[in-house]
Amino acid sequence: MQAKKKETPVKEEKKKENSEERVPTGIKNFDSLIDGGFEKNSTNLLVGSSGSGKSIFAAQFLMDGMKKGGKCLFITFEESKKEFYSNMNDFGWDLAELEKKRKVLFSPIYSAKSQDNA
């Protein structure tokens, strides 16, 4: 008869530690996939093709942060402020008003090539 190997709850303990150091995205199903949110003080980059939902995901995360009293920075490489704010208004997110209250800062970073097309 072979003795059973005793399992240790290391994984569960680690998960509890990480959940204390997480920042929820405000996107419930996504948060459950990543142990409760992004790691606190981490840098996260959203990458995807045009129309994949990067801006909506980012805006939802920002809106959740602002609801909790945070101030937010949105950096874009392509979308204009006017276009972005207009698109987010479709979701009921008035970023222009939040910008007036100094809750959000929109920062476009354009390459020389994209400026020629602006």
Image (cartoon, rainbow, N blue to C red):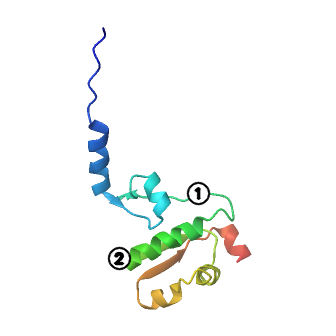
Q: Mark 1 points at which residue?
A: 47
Residue at x 41%, y 90% (from the top left corner):
101
Q: How many discs appear? A: 2
Query: Alpha-carbon neighbours of circle 2 within 10 Å: few (<14), some, or many (≥20)?
Result: few
Percent x, y of residue 35: 39, 52
Disc 1 element: loop
| Label 1: how many Cα within 10 Å (few below 14, some 14–19, many 20+) | few
Sequence-wise, which precedes: disc 2 or disc 1? Answer: 1
- Between residue 28 and residue 57, name the one nearer to us: 28
Q: Which residue lies furthest to the front in this view?
A: 1
Q: Image quarter for residue 90? A: bottom right
The answer to whether the residue labelled 2 contacts the one labelled 1, judged by CB atoms less than 8 Å apart, is no
| Residue occupying image coordinates x 59% and y 84% | 89
Residue type beneath disc 2: Lys
User: Could you say which is closer to the camera, residue 79 or residue 34?
Assistant: 34
Location of the C terminus (image quadrant): bottom right
Q: Can residue 44 be seen in this view?
A: no
Q: How far apart are marks 2 and 1 (CA)?
A: 26 Å
Q: Quadrant of the N terminus?
A: top left
Q: Nearer the viewer, residue 1 or 98?
A: 1
Q: Which amino acid does label 1 sit on?
A: Val
Residue 39, given in percent of the width and then of the height, sits at 36, 56
As drawn, the label of residue 68 is: 2
Q: In which quarter of the image is residue 112?
A: bottom right
Residue 15 lies, with reference to residue 59, above or below; the image says above
Residue 82 picture quarter: bottom right
Give residue 21's position: percent from left, percent from top.
30, 56
Q: Is residue 9 above or below residue 99?
A: above
Look at the image and tell me whether residue 5 can be seen: yes
Residue 94, given in percent of the width and then of the height, sits at 53, 86
SS class, disc 2: loop
Identify which residue is drawn at 48% across, 65% down: 27
